[in-house]
Image (tube, rainbow, N blue to C red):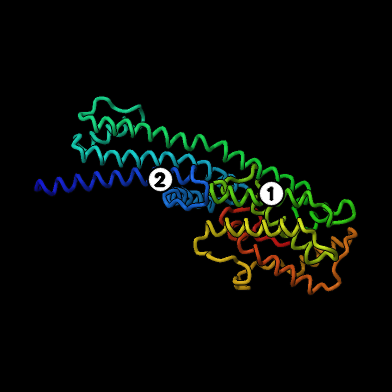
Amino acid sequence: MPDYLFVALRVIAGLGGIILVITTLSAAIRSFVLPRNEVVRLNVWVFSGIRVFFDFAAKSANSYERRDKIMAHYAPIALVALPVVWEALVGAGYTCVYWALGEGSWQQCYELSSSSLTTLGNADAHHLLVRVLTYSEAALGLLLLTLLLSYLPTIYQAFSRREATVASLELRAGTPPTPACLLNWLNHDGSVQNDDHQWAAWEQWFVEIEESHTSLPILSFFRSPQPGRSWVTAGGLILDTAALLFAAVDGPQPRQAQITFKAGCLALNRVYRFFNTKAGVEPTSLTPESEIPDPGRHDFDEACQVLADKGVKICADGDAAWQQYRELRSRYAVAQQFLSRLLMAPGYDAAV
């Protein structure tokens, strides 16, 4: 090979290595330090690659409990795999840089890079510049690992807060949970419109979901400790309850419940758009009616009858109430169904 081509190859390898290191460091910072919901392509490739194996294993399971047990390992394994991939890419980048600087063969450069990445640098390098690079590589290796370790408590704190609300809904909405049962619980003092405190707590829960599940998207895939629970199902239950209250119950609509409903629709739709890159608009009136999951008129009428039996005053015009319920549900139903399928939530196709 002519000398000028060999020199050009070393220059290309060195620049490529530098770009690879910078890209990987940028991905790590944007993943855990940047406080906004930005899609990090490198992380998407890692998560998608791991998800292929879990999807294959889940499809071979013969029961939901078995699928849930398999998918429960997906998020933790994918999260732990991130720093492994980051460090492997940083090591590959520095290997290219060392080779470009003439530190020996590819194997020798790889050994130098691996040694520097897992220790405090290499003082035996031939040149001062290479020694500086080995120390910088050692610092980056520690930094990448520290980023994940420092944010694990944040992730699990958000997970615990989320699951506390999910578990409390099961106590209030029955097993299996239904909007009618939850409304009956809210009607404990004879007026279903009075429990602003509970609606305010659910509003705060939706606000936290929107912030945490887009800035730390892997959190969406952490499954509930119990197989029959899911944050997506719980969010849909709260919104279904609000929609049933607004459409079917005769009386004033609580202001706090309206705010909670808006917060819930925003949260589910924004998480939905984050994961579904093709969704560029709110799935409300612009969503074709055929694509909106229909809860079923029979189930709606049955829910109204359950409320009436408990003394809740129901609107006289059942058809108008049904149409209003469908319109309200169309504001979040597409997002809920998409997320339920993505996360393999229990009973995602259940109606009211």
Residue type for callout 2: Ser
Q: Earlier in the sequence, mark 1 or mark 2?
A: 2
Q: Position of residue 64 (x, y in %)?
A: 62, 51
Residue 226 versus residue 281 in the image, above or below: above
> Most extreme residue toward the top, as rendered?
123
Residue under the point 26% across and 41% down: 96
Q: Quadrant of the C terminus?
A: bottom right
Residue under the point 40% across and 45% down: 26
Depth check: 133 or 51 in front? 133
Q: Is residue 10 left or right of residue 289?
A: left
Residue under the point 55% across and 51% down: 214
> Most extreme residue toward the left, as rendered?
2
The quadrant holding residue 283 is bottom right
Q: Position of residue 36 (x, y in %)?
A: 52, 50
- At label 1, counting other C-alpha atoms closer than 10 Å, the crowd grade (few under 14, some 14-19, many 20 or more) is some
Report if residue 101 is visible in the image: yes
Q: Is residue 142 left or right of residue 121?
A: right
For label 2, the residue is 26
Q: Position of residue 301 (x, y in %)?
A: 80, 67
Q: Position of residue 48 (x, y in %)?
A: 46, 52
